[in-house]
Image (cartoon, grey):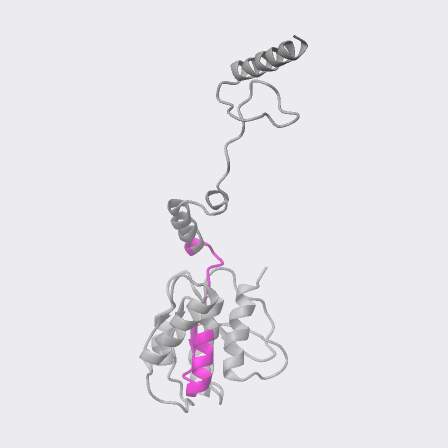
Amino acid sequence: REAHRNRLGRQQRTQLLMQEDPCQKRRRPPGQQPGLPLAAPVDLRQTLEPPPRMQRKRREELRQNRRRPPGLLPALLRPAAMETVIRMSTELGVLRVTPILSDRVVARGHKADRWQRIAQAAAAQCGRADLPQIDAPCTLAEGLDAVGEGWTAVICVPGAPGRAPDGPAALFIGPEGGWSEAELALLQSAGVDRLGLGATTLRADTAAVACVVRVLSRP
């Protein structure tokens, strides 16, 4: 009779718990108050990944941000150096690459297909969702005219003081032999800002990458 009473007592307690919380189908964890339903399992993917609409809104905010990635206008370099510039600038997030046919350019030709393949491979490797626009080579004057409203044209000069400009920047990088006197006069007349990358003279491909990093790391 004692065992029968204990069994009936357990059944009554179980029924009482189910009446307190009809949604509860399993034992309540220790410390949880009666009458509160158990928390539903959380899908961590939904928690960590915003919905597509928020992702599009975030991309648009980044596009409108004053610290948007710069545009790069390097002088047309030798094939290996030019490919390095395109690959690294793609990895760093540059929006546009426009080669410049300066007076002291040694390399010639427009390898658009190869440059595009290099940019695609670099974007896939670094996880970038878009590709930079790679233009056909143009003259320095055409490059200056292409700088959009609200953008600041910048030229890198060894040893020059100054800080990276606020807002979007168009970075002009000279060739292996440097800008000619006529080109420097044109840049000065256009009011291009001067940005130093240190006291040493860098290779053209190194200067292009260093200038992009300098602009992206501005406070």
Residue sitting farthest toward the front: 1
Quadrant housing residue 34: top right
Residue 191 x %, y %: 46, 71
122 or 75, nearer to the observer: 122
Residue at the location (58% across, 80% down)? 158
Residue at the location (54% across, 69% down)? 213
Q: Is residue 100 left or right of residue 163?
A: left
Residue 73 x %, y %: 42, 75
**Which portion, as a residue range, is magenta?**
63-87
Residue 84 part of the magenta segment: yes
The image shows residue 211, relative to residue 80, as above or below, that is above
Residue 108 x %, y %: 35, 89
154 or 218, nearer to the observer: 218
140 or 216, nearer to the observer: 216
Quadrant position of the C terminus in the picture: bottom right
Residue at the location (50% across, 76% down)? 208
Residue 188 seen in this snapshot: no
The image shows residue 150, relative to residue 111, as above or below, that is above
The image shows residue 58, relative to residue 207, as above or below, that is above
Residue 117 x %, y %: 36, 75
Q: Is residue 38 left or right of residue 113?
A: right
Residue 168 part of the magenta segment: no
Quadrant position of the N terminus in the picture: top right
Residue 4 seen in this snapshot: yes
